[in-house]
Image (tube, rainbow, N blue to C red):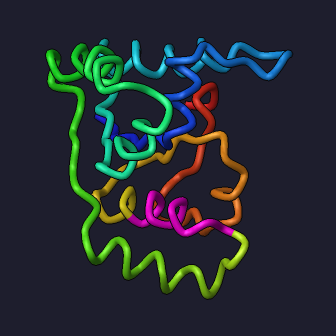
Amino acid sequence: MSLIYLDTNIYLDYWSGRSDKLRPLGEFAYAVHRRSVECEFTILASDLVLTELRRSIDDGEIKEVFSSLKECHKLLIEKVGDSDVKTAKALKNEHPEVPLPDLIHYCFAINNKADVLVTRDAHFTMLPQERIKIRKPEEI
């Protein structure tokens, strides 16, 4: 069973039902959630994702969506560690165009042995993919 890490933008697509005028991004994000509940994979989340979500969504809504994943034991929430931040800061020298929070997400996912980092953010495609795959929701 795969372990996937969802970038904050995927949760926002899901909660907001966003689209890009051509595609239903919220539906793609929902499909990832549904596939996890159906035991296809486990979702890894970080406290950084929760912090970023709280800028747009209240705690009640966050708990509501995470509860179905927790009930079926398909959600693993971990704290970003000092080693994640340290590695991200070192990577910043090699990839100055990538925002530090994105580098932290990337390093956290790798350090927690995620198989795939799911995102729509183009910054992630600039990063090495030898240790983790970078995919959009509709690509997994």
List x then y, in percent, for residue 26. Answer: 60, 16
Decide whether residue 104 is among the magenta residues. Answer: yes
Horizontally, residue 97 falls left or right of residue 86, namely right
Q: Nearer the viewer, residue 103 or 111?
A: 103
Image position of 95 with respect to 69: above or below: below
Horizontally, residue 124 falls left or right of residue 115, namely right
Image position of 21 with respect to 109: above or below: above
Image position of 105 with respect to 75: above or below: below
List x then y, in percent, for residue 20. Answer: 79, 22
Q: Quadrant of residue 99?
A: bottom right
Q: Principal SS element in the magenta part?
A: helix
x 16%, y 17%: residue: 72
Outermost residue, right direction?
22
Which quadrant of the rendered structure holds the N terminus? top left
List x then y, in percent, for residue 121. Answer: 67, 47
Q: Nearer the viewer, residue 34 or 39?
A: 34
x 77%, y 16%: residue: 23
Count of numbered circles in the view:
0
Q: Quadrant of residue 76?
A: top left
Q: Quadrant of residue 68?
A: top left
x 44%, y 65%: residue: 104
Which quadrant of the rendered structure holds the C terminus? top right
Q: Nearer the viewer, residue 108 or 13?
A: 13
x 61%, y 87%: residue: 93
Question: Bounds of the magenta span?
Answer: 98-107
List x then y, in percent, for residue 62. Answer: 33, 24
